[in-house]
Image: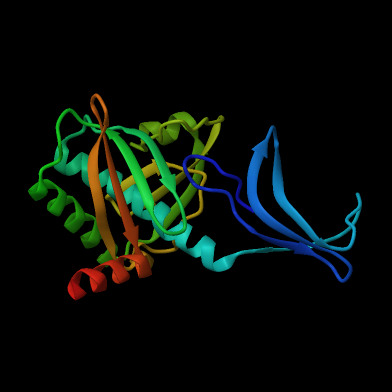
Amino acid sequence: FYAESGGQVGDTGEHGNLGAKFTVNDTQKRGSAHSHIGTLRKGVIEIGDKLAATIDAKRRAGIVLNHSATHLLHAALRKVLGLHVQQKGSLVAPDRLRFDFAHFEPVTPAQLKEIEALVNEHVRLNHDADVRVLPYDDAIAAGALAFFGDKYGDKVRVLKLGDFSTELCGGTHVHRSGDIGLFKVTSEGGIAAGVRRIEAVTGQGALELVNANKAV
């Protein structure tokens, strides 16, 4: 189970055996441990018991699409708006993504359209998600971007999507960028001085948004 970190929400699911069932509603880091928070639905669980752990696969799949799309969005923002763009926060949930970034003025409709088109272009290019573990200094020297709020050790995990996006990230991701399917921006606005926020959806959520707009 993935514990909440770097904007990605914690996994949910179930632990159980023939005599017990525990529903996991959230997963959080507590020191070096992953804490599975939830409700015992059946039986008794004791220290030493063996349990089968099952992640909510559909929910995780949505998180995966939105997390990889966040990386493509970050790269697109820097290409369209400038290299001064830096992440200031994020939320990666199963149904949406939210990305906060440093920028000194509102993003124009034309720029937003260009950003969305650029993300979708790299979705269609179907880049392989190349994941490597490297020494931190080597990763930064190779051009990897570090995400805001994350803490990194001597060895770091680097996610590379084609030649378009290279970032440090310990989260869960697609196998290829084409898995994202479709990326649609739902809103853009300012949340603080010099900080903007973009919200978006991917995959089935993006398709449903397109269909809803067509029906209006």
Side (left or right) of 189 relative to 15: left
Question: Percent x, y for residue 179?
Answer: 38, 67
Question: Percent x, y for residue 34?
Answer: 69, 43
Question: Percent x, y for residue 178?
Answer: 33, 67
- Which residue is at the front of the view, 159 or 106? 106
With respect to residue 16, does 186 lie above or below?
above
Q: How is the image coloured?
A: rainbow
With respect to residue 105, does 61 lie above or below?
below
Q: Quadrant of the N terminus?
A: bottom right
Total tally of numbered discs in the picture: 0
Q: Residue furthest top?
A: 193
Quarter of the image for residue 90 reads top left
Residue at figure coordinates x 90%, y 58% from the top left: 44
Q: Quadrant of the C terminus?
A: bottom left
Quarter of the image for residue 177 reads bottom left
With respect to residue 27, does 142 lie above or below?
above
Residue at figure coordinates x 24%, y 24% from the top left: 193
